[in-house]
Image (cartoon, rainbow, N blue to C red):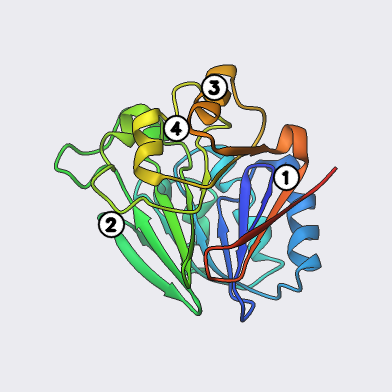
């Protein structure tokens, strides 16, 4: 598991590769280098969590470098560029209800807030697909853009995970105490620099807090038994 910019790279024990969001244009070079450094030759699954630039900006460019097995999106993102132009090249699927996908040794649980008959939010971050990835007894959940409004509509799902990748760069409106009590993570990783209130919550729960603004590119490695080794690059 590696966090760089606005994307998350997850690689299984058989080199199966999952990419959660593709980052903004400025993330592209670092993401390509990270993928090549890990020996990635293809991307099995890409999850476009929501229809914002930081989720899909590099998808077209990535598809020219790595074969992509399948792209999942929330149903809204499929109608915008660059995804629409790729629909005849890369298989796409809209996730309308919670869905489990097996990718080699990795199990993906795609969790959505808009399957409760209330429909989509007007604010796109709240329509995020949350992705829980499980390898053996180890799990990580990526909260994408889901803040308190979205969190309230997914809490009935099985959110428990060892590592939580927080929403929207550690926004004060995300990763609420109620949400933390559902996830019960050993550590929280944040892309960017979280706000002070967010850090206070981590201290209150006694949760280890890593963030890329301080720790650089974050890499987490697990043995599949719930144990994690955390490394960073300055």
Q: Residue furthest right?
A: 234
Q: Label 1: which residue?
A: 27
Q: Position of residue 85 (x, y in %)?
A: 51, 57
Q: Label 3: which residue?
A: 200
Q: Nearer the viewer, residue 187 or 47?
A: 187
How crowded is the residue under tag 4: few (<14 C-alpha within 10 Å), some, or many (20+)?
A: many
Q: Nearer the viewer, residue 186 or 101?
A: 186
Using the numbered discs, state the Cα–Cα distance from disc 4 to disc 2 in whole angstroms: 20 Å
> Which residue is depicted at the point 40% across and 42% down?
128
Circle count: 4
How crowded is the residue under tag 2: few (<14 C-alpha within 10 Å), some, or many (20+)?
A: some
Using the numbered discs, state the Cα–Cα distance from disc 3 to disc 2 in whole angstroms: 31 Å
Viewer-nearest of discs 1 and 2:
2
> Which residue is depicted at the point 56% across and 47% down?
56
Q: Which image quarter holds the C terminus?
A: top right
Q: Label 2: which residue?
A: 98
Q: Is residue 54 left or right of residue 230?
A: left
Residue 123 seen in this snapshot: no
Disc 3 is placed on an element classified as helix
Q: Sequence order check: which comes first, mark 1 or mark 4?
A: 1
> Which residue is depicted at the point 21% across and 47% down?
115
Residue 1's mark? none
Viewer-nearest of discs 4 and 2:
4
Using the numbered discs, state the Cα–Cα distance from disc 3 to disc 4 in whole angstroms: 11 Å
Using the numbered discs, state the Cα–Cα distance from disc 1 to disc 2 in whole angstroms: 29 Å
Q: Label 4: which residue?
A: 175
How crowded is the residue under tag 1: few (<14 C-alpha within 10 Å), some, or many (20+)?
A: some
Using the numbered discs, state the Cα–Cα distance from disc 1 to disc 3 in whole angstroms: 29 Å
Q: Sequence order check: which comes first, mark 4 or mark 2?
A: 2
């Amino acid at each position: 598991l590696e966090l760089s910019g606005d994307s998350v790279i997850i690689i299984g024990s058989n080199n199966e590769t999952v990419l959660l969001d593709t980052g903004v244009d400025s993330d592209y070079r670092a993401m390509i280098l990270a993928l090549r450094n890990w020996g990635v030759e293809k991307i099995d699954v890409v999850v476009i969590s929501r229809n914002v630039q930081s989720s899909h900006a590099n998808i077209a460019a990535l598809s020219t470098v790595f074969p992509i097995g399948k792209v999942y999106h929330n149903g809204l993102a499929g109608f915008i560029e660059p995804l629409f132009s790729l629909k005849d090249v890369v298989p796409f699927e809209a996730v309308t209800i919670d869905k489990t996908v097996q990718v080699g040794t990795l199990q993906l649980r795609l969790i959505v807030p808009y399957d409760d008959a209330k429909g989509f939010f007007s604010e796109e971050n709240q329509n995020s697909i949350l992705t829980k990835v499980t390898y053996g007894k180890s799990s990580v959940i990526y909260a994408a853009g889901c803040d308190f409004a979205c969190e309230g509509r997914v809490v009935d799902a099985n959110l428990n995970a060892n590592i939580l990748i927080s929403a929207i760069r550690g926004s004060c409106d995300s990763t609420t105490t109620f949400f933390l009590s559902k996830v019960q993570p050993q550590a929280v990783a944040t892309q960017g620099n979280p706000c002070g209130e967010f850090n206070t919550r981590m201290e209150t729960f006694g949760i280890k807090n890593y963030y890329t603004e301080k720790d650089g590119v974050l890499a987490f490695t697990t043995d599949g038994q719930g144990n994690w080794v955390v490394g960073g690059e300055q």
